[in-house]
Image (cartoon, rainbow, N blue to C red):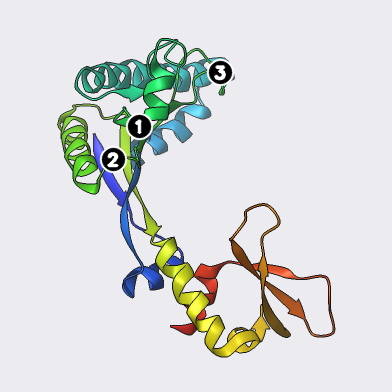
Amino acid sequence: MLITQDRMVGDVDRKLVNHGYGKIVVHSLKIGVYYTKEQLDENVRTRDILSPEDWLKGGEDYRIDFHKKVLALLNRIHEKHYLYQFEQGSDTNGGRDRYRSGDYDLFFYSNKGWNGKDYFDYVSLTVNDKKTDEENALILADVIQVLESADISCASCCIQYHAVLDRELINCEVRALYDKVGEKLLTQYHGVTGKLKMMDSEHEEGRVFYGFFKKGSRKRYYPVETEYLLFKTL
């Protein structure tokens, strides 16, 4: 199976990570149908030769083959690493309790049914964020090894990364900056001139948030995330 990596994260997250306010880790494994360039070219060529029914059937047979082979792989993985939602009825047979308690290895999702078919042609295995980085690294290394060694040419897996930010640290940093410079912490927001105000949350006692008020506005404001405020100061 072809394995690729997607390490793209947003500019705000990447800069915060580079300054020590978070880390970039694996978010999920995304497994989908794969066609080589030669197969795609052949698919275009046969479209003009075969009847529409036969051409569509060839594509569906390919996806069914993907389903069967990937399902066999997932069964192997599930024997060692608990995939929440992989088993039918996992929500009722103790699976939901395992999910709520964090006692699972990867969160399974497929588009079976959602695609109007009784098979899947897309699967994602999402990391359990209640486990430590070390625990997740061991699980992922084992699962990726199984996928890499699989002789399945009709499937590919993309290792998707994302940024995990230390929001408590970021909130403290922004609060300290606001206490120091006040409304001047942000005077331009997406081309609009105004000022920043810290406000108390109506829904969570002790929590504050920040709103950007356009010049002349007293009531209407744009909510501004603390991550963005810190990003603008770096």
**Horizontal side, residue 15 vs residue 133: left or right:** right
**Horizontal side, residue 194 vs residue 20: left or right:** right
Amino acid marked by disc 1: Gly
Q: Residue at x 67, y 60 (%)?
A: 201
Question: Tag 3: Cα neighbours inside 10 Å, few (<14), some, or many (≥20)?
Answer: few
Circle nearer the N terminus (3, 2): 3
- Please say if the residues under marks 2 and 1 sit with CB atoms less than 8 Å apart: yes
Question: Tag 2: Cα neighbours inside 10 Å, few (<14), some, or many (≥20)?
Answer: some
Q: Residue at x 59, y 61 (%)?
A: 207
Element assignment for label 1: loop
The C terminus: image quadrant: bottom left
Name the residue carrying label 3: 51
User: How far across and down, in percent of the image, does residue 107 sit?
Assistant: 38, 30
Q: Residue at x 83, y 71 (%)?
A: 219
User: How many angstroms separate mark 3 from mark 2 (CA)?
Assistant: 52 Å
User: How many angstroms separate mark 2 from mark 1 (CA)?
Assistant: 8 Å
Q: Which mark is residue 102?
A: 1
Name the residue carrying label 2: 131
Amino acid marked by disc 3: Ser
Amino acid marked by disc 2: Lys
Element assignment for label 3: loop
